[in-house]
Amino acid sequence: MGADLTHSTAHGVSISDVLSPLYVPEFIRSFFPLTGAINHDGHSAPLLAVQFTKLRDGVFIGCDSTSFRHFLNA
C-alpha cells in the first residue's frame, strides 16, 4: 500500500502524437499506471499510482483514477 510513482520515457513520441489523432492511440494505455489491474488487485495495489512519461517535447502525467479516488478518500 501507499503511493507508487513511476518515471518512464516514450522515445520518439511527441505531444502532437498524443493530442492530434481523432481516436485515442493504443500506446496511451502504457502511460497510465495499473493498466490491466482488476478490482480484487486493490488489496495489494497502492492507494495512489502516478506515472510521469517523458515525451520528445514534453511530459505526460497519468494517474490511476481508482487509486487516486481512494487516496483522496483516505
Image (cartoon, helix red, strand yellow):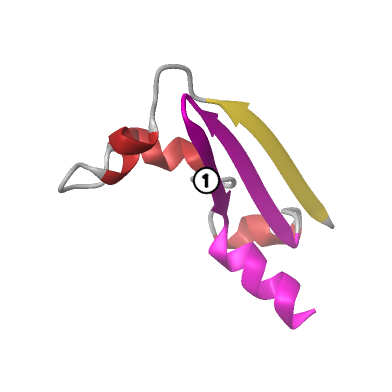
- Give the mark count: 1
Q: Who is closer to the viewer here, 17 or 25?
A: 17
Q: Who is closer to the viewer here, 24 or 57?
A: 57
**What residue sits 36% from the left and 33% below the top?**
27
- For mark 1, what is the residue? 32
Which image quarter: residue 47? bottom right
Q: Is residue 32 magenta?
A: no
Magenta range is 47-74
Q: Which part of the image, by quadrant, shows the C terminus?
A: bottom right
Q: Is residue 15 left or right of residue 53?
A: left
Question: Is any part of residue 31 visible from this angle?
Answer: yes
**What residue sits 65% from the left and 67% below the top?**
68
Q: Is residue 52 above or below residue 74?
A: above
**What residue sits 41% from the left and 41% below the top?**
29
State the residue lying farthest toward the top.
11
Q: Under tag 1, what secondary structure?
A: loop
**What residue sits 57% from the left and 57% below the top?**
64
Which image quarter: residue 67? bottom right
Q: Hey, what amino acid is under mark 1?
A: Phe
